[in-house]
Image (tube, rainbow, N blue to C red):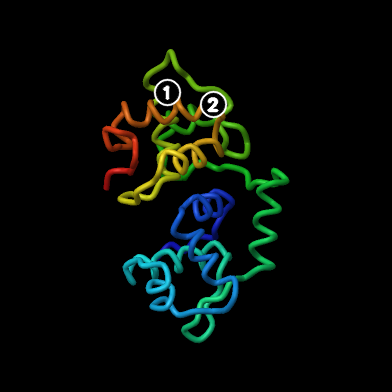
Amino acid sequence: MNARQPNMLDFVKAMSDADRLRIIGALVRRPKTAAQVAEKLGIDSRAAFQHLSFLVFVGAVRKEGGLYALDEARLETLARATFENNRDEYVPAPEMDEKSRKVLASFLNSDGSIRQIPIQQPAKLQVILEYLVTAFTPGQVYTEKEVNMIIRRFHVDTAGLRRDLIDAGLLERESDGSAYWRPQ
């Protein structure tokens, strides 16, 4: 199994999910089991476990003998790094094809944010959109505000990129814009 270390994008992704933020709030006062978190928040126990596991992975929560506790020191360090722009340097996945790697090198900043959107170049825009959509968990439902918050990590044009992701079929949404999700 290929174990990887969490990066700043993982932290941003963790903090951009409403249920994960609610879980952090539930753990502020005292540690809880996954079942207690699920009951307190009124969510499925499997979903609670998955969210808790991701929060453990990014370092915001630690697991101690069946109880999940907020790792306040680690959470503060991660948040400070995010707000101080001390981001990890983006490195394209080694299995990515050379053409896509070149496009990303041309249009991304070293921290993985989008330097320029190749609007007049559909093939290059598709590579950027496929890169951007990886910040969304397949099957997870997001509000428009959450989608904008995730996209804003990459570029200020949240409305344009959100529309491009939907037009490309990489994100789907309810017709009234009340819910967005990445198809599985």
Query: Residue 174: x and y, percent?
Result: 28, 37
On screen, residue 7 above or below 43: above
Q: CB under 8 Å between callouts 2 and 1?
A: yes
- 142 relative position to 11: left or right: left
Query: Residue 87: x and y, percent?
Result: 65, 46
Query: Residue 66: x and y, percent?
Result: 46, 84
* Residue assigned mark 1: 124
Displayed quadrant of residue 156:
top right
Local packing at callout 2 (Cα closer than 10 Å; few below 14, some 14-19, many 20+) is: some
Query: Residue 73: x and y, percent?
Result: 69, 67
User: Which of 54/106 is in front?
Assistant: 54
Please give the name of the residue rendered at 50% of the width and 50% of the height, measured from the top-left corner.
Answer: 16
Classify mark 1: helix, strand or loop. Answer: helix
- 59 relative position to 180: left or right: right
Local packing at callout 1 (Cα closer than 10 Å; few below 14, some 14-19, many 20+) is: many
Please give the name of the residue rendered at 45% of the width and 80% of the height, measured from the top-left corner.
Answer: 33
The CA distance from mark 2 to mark 1 is 9 Å
User: Which of 35/58 is in front?
Assistant: 35
Classify mark 2: helix, strand or loop. Answer: helix
Please give the name of the residue rendered at 52% of the width and 53% of the height, measured from the top-left corner.
Answer: 10
* Residue assigned mark 2: 107
- 87 relative position to 121: left or right: right
**What residue type is disc 1 on?**
Lys
**What residue type is disc 2 on?**
Phe
User: Which of 113/163 is in front?
Assistant: 163
